[in-house]
Amino acid sequence: MHNHFVLQIAALAKSIRVIADMEEPIGRILKKTEVRTPQMPICFPHHHINHLLWLPLVQLADGLILEKTSCPLGVLLIIFESRPDALVQIASLTIRTGNGLLLKGGKEARRSNAILHKIITSVIPESIGDKLIGLVASREDISDLLKLDDVIDLVIPRGSNSLVSKIKSSTKIPVLGHADGVCHVYVDKSANADMAKKVVLDAKIDYPAACNTMETLLVHQDLSSTGLLNELLAELRREGVTLHGGPRASSLLELPEAQSLHHEYSSLACTVEIVDDMEAAIDHIHQHGRHVVSHTDCIITEDHEAAEMFLHRVDSAAVFHNASTRFCDGARFGLGAEVGVSTSRIHARGPVEVEGLLTTRWVLRGSGQVVNGDKGVIYSHKDLSLKTQI
């Protein structure tokens, strides 16, 4: 057990160093453009002669330099589960992105969170201030904080779907998170049997409570006759997984029928369903993954054409081929850490890391240019090199 904690701390320290070693994320120039108004001839009738006199139009905007730059979101309220390592990851990401932070952790880790908060704030330079990160002590304070839509810019809840749903219904502040994260693994008819067993088991039993854990196993109908379906179920049962069946699987395999095909067990349990083919699997994911809140979905197949079709058509925050859904994680993606996984399209999707905690602003540099009506003016834009940073 001691070695396990040592390894956890080492991994946490490594993820923080990844964040610390990143290129400065604030004030990066993402796009740089020169705005121009090319000379356009305008004709005026000359009263002495029978032809038109062409004069150049004054160039209204020449010399304007427009930059799209990165900047912090503002003040974040993050409500997270009992794991103290979450506090360290979240604090590291928000310090790196220049955001203000209010933290509310689970009561089970209250003392650990208080000590970690004290350590982190003690090393923040005085010029920035130890008030950059605040620790919310009680659950009762949350309802009051959720009313501060003029102070807090974003709420990120990490926890059960009931928690996230409750937060979303209790505030006008934008909420980034996922109310449901049903992850599917689809085993295609051409799947390698050994690979399928390994990936399915890892996706379910590696950390059953995580949001990137497989909740539904979809299996091509042909595999019921080859024996692979029964082998997969036997492997899952051997690891203590309780199996529930969709309408088709419960009838064929004598499994207790799942109460819902859109259910996040967050435990050693999952739903099994048999589908006609990959098209049916995709339809199932879109219907029961609730489309816009689909988390992570995987196909196991040796048919690369089918795999590419699955990856392009399944509209989830993350889609995998021949890999466990457990890989959907900020550290495993090389992002250092994450404040959570978002299934929303606005404004970040998937593991939310440094870039997900930034927004953009526009900077325009000129020398007295004015619009002056600009009727009939055609603007042109030239992309400039990004070598010169702010």
Image (cartoon, helix red, strand yellow):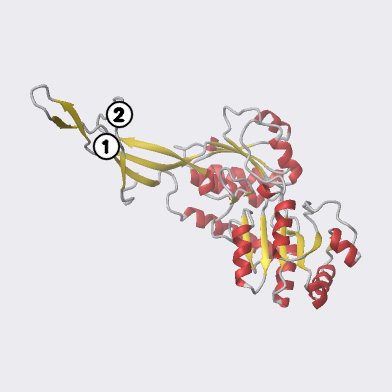
Q: Where is residue 350? Give x, y as percent.
A: 60, 52
Q: Where is residue 186? Give x, y as percent.
A: 72, 65
Q: Please tell me whether residue 6 is drawn above or below residue 171 in the rendered image.
A: below
Say whether residue 370 is visible: yes
Q: Residue furthest front?
A: 50
Instruction: Give neighbour class at mark 1: few <14, some 14-19, many 20+ (Cα, 10 Å).
Output: some
Secondary element under disc 1, as helix, strand or loop, is loop
Residues under numbered marks 1 and 2 in contact, where contact means CB atoms less than 8 Å apart: yes
Q: Amino acid at mark 1?
A: Thr
Q: Foreground: 162 or 139?
A: 162
Say whether residue 243 is visible: no
Residue annotated with mark 1: 37
Q: Residue furthest left?
A: 48
Instruction: Give neighbour class at mark 2: few <14, some 14-19, many 20+ (Cα, 10 Å).
Output: few
Q: Amino acid at mark 2?
A: Asp
Q: Where is residue 163? Give x, y as percent.
A: 74, 41
At horizontal 34% and vertical 50% (from top left) the residue drawn is: 386
At horizontal 54% and vertical 56% (from top left) the residue drawn is: 335
At horizontal 13% and vertical 30% (from top left) the residue drawn is: 53
From the viewer's perspective, tell me whether residue 2 is left or right of residue 346: right
Q: Foreground: 332 or 90?
A: 332
Q: Foreground: 315 or 119?
A: 315
Q: Please tell me whether residue 15 is drawn above or below residue 197 in the rendered image.
A: above
Q: Please tell me whether residue 332 is drawn above or below residue 238 in the rendered image.
A: above
* Quarter that holds the N terminus: bottom right
Q: What numbered label is drawn on residue 238?
A: none
At horizontal 64% and vertical 57% (from top left) the residue drawn is: 314
Query: Which of the marked residues, 1 or 2, is nearer the chain's N terminus?
Result: 1
Q: Foreground: 68 or 90?
A: 68
Residue annotated with mark 2: 374
Q: Where is residue 251? Give x, y as percent.
A: 90, 63
